[in-house]
Image (cartoon, rainbow, N blue to C red):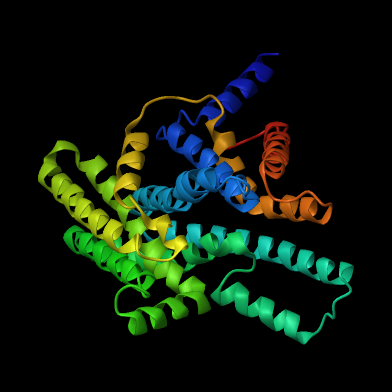
């Protein structure tokens, strides 16, 4: 009987992550952001233009930048503790996850082709292999692929490059991104060529102009948090710099294609929000469930969406409610029925 109580105590400590740095609000943020991604892909407000602009294409678009910023914050902390071993472990984990889900969605694409009585030939395999390396094996997996490519370069930057040059890199990469998306407004020939490139080899573009800048913002948060009040001048420098970038982005991006509004208020918002979440001491009883569930929900939700579409349930609020409910039930049953859950 005493042994059972001890096991339950160990499991409870594992679920609350009380033995490690308490980042429960970050876990909650990742879980909510996963639901935001589901909302985007379900096109939840497809019949309401105003709600679609402000929520689906506004609020929900904060999810991926926050994912990258959180990843940069947590990974940089691991690097400072474990060095290159942290990079090797994280890369191996990401590659395994990406390969598994790439295989799942390849099987889905083959089944869909058979269902539609389409020809399955060598071209299908070639196209899938190209997308898997240079774009993404499924539309939502671009985040993981860019992260896989970005982490080695990010590791080099945070271990070999001084913090002020990291700040300069953030600004430079974001300005190039904004310039490219403003191709029809300013320098259309050059900007158009860059934009076309970004749509041809998405993974490389996303690595340099989405993943790297936001990972570096996460590292700045780790740097500022660990140094406390000793780096107030650096903190104000970062904030001032990001404010300038934000203003330039607003001016340029508002003249650009619709998908560029994704960039508005990013790195500044991500910097402040993740900084606040990282410094919080609030405990959430099952935060480890939220952490694990967010990745599973992110990876699996297109399968459910595709299933609903095949069964004549179109995009919209009903699609979102069914998918999000199914995901919560699935992840809850998958993780919480297990006898041992460990923090990672």
**Residue 79 appears at what percent x and percent y?**
36, 54
**Residue 37 appears at what percent x and percent y?**
56, 49
Among the 4 quarters of the image, the one containing residue 130: bottom right
From the viewer's side, name the closer residue of 201 and 106. 201
Residue 111 visible: yes
**Residue 82 position (above or below residue 275):** below
**Residue 242 left/right relative to 153:** left
Residue pictured at 41% horizontal, 25% vertical: 282
- Of the 4 image quadrants, the one containing the N terminus is top right
Count of all numbered marks drawn on residues in the image? 0
Residue 159 visible: no
Residue pictured at 58% horizontal, 37% vertical: 342
- Farthest residue, direction left: 233
Residue pictured at 50% horizontal, 71% vertical: 203
From the viewer's side, name the closer residue of 120 and 197. 197
From the viewer's side, name the closer residue of 119 and 53. 53
**Residue 25 appears at what percent x and percent y?**
44, 33
**Residue 216 position (above or below residue 338):** below
**Residue 69 left/right relative to 122:** left
**Residue 317 left/right relative to 49:** right
**Residue 343 appears at what percent x and percent y?**
53, 38
Among the 4 quarters of the image, the one containing residue 236: top left
**Residue 25 left/right relative to 94:** left
């Amino acid at each position: 009987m005493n042994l059972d109580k001890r096991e339950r105590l160990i499991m409870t400590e594992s679920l609350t992550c009380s033995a490690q740095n308490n980042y429960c609000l970050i876990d909650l943020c990742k879980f909510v952001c996963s639901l935001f991604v589901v909302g985007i892909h379900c096109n939840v407000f497809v019949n309401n233009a105003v709600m679609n602009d402000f929520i689906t294409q506004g609020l929900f678009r904060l999810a991926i930048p926050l994912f990258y910023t959180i990843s940069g914050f947590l990974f940089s902390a691991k690097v400072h503790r474990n060095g290159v071993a942290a990079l090797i472990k994280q890369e191996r984990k990401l590659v395994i996850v990406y390969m598994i889900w790439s295989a799942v969605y390849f099987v889905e694409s083959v089944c869909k082709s058979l269902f539609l009585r389409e020809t399955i030939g060598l071209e299908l395999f070639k196209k899938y292999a190209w997308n898997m390396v240079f774009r993404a094996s499924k539309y939502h997996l671009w985040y993981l692929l860019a992260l896989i490519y970005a982490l080695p370069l990010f590791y080099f930057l945070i271990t070999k490059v001084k913090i002020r040059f990291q700040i300069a890199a953030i600004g430079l990469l974001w300005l190039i991104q904004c310039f490219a998306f403003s191709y029809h407004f300013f320098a259309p020939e050059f900007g158009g060529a860059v934009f076309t490139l970004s749509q041809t080899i998405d993974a490389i573009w996303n690595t340099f102009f989405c993943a790297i800048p936001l990972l570096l913002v996460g590292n700045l948060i780790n740097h500022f948090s660990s140094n406390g009040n000793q780096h107030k001048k650096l903190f104000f420098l970062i904030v001032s710099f990001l404010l300038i970038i934000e203003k330039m982005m607003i001016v340029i991006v508002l003249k650009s294609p619709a998908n560029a509004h994704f960039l508005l208020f990013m790195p500044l918002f991500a910097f402040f929000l993740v900084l606040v979440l990282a410094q919080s001491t609030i405990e959430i009883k099952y935060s480890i469930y939220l952490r694990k569930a967010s990745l599973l929900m992110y990876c699996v939700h297109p399968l459910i969406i595709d299933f609903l579409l095949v069964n004549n349930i179109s995009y919209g609020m009903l699609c979102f409610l069914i998918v999000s409910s199914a995901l919560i039930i699935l992840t809850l049953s998958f993780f919480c029925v297990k006898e041992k859950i460990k923090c990672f």
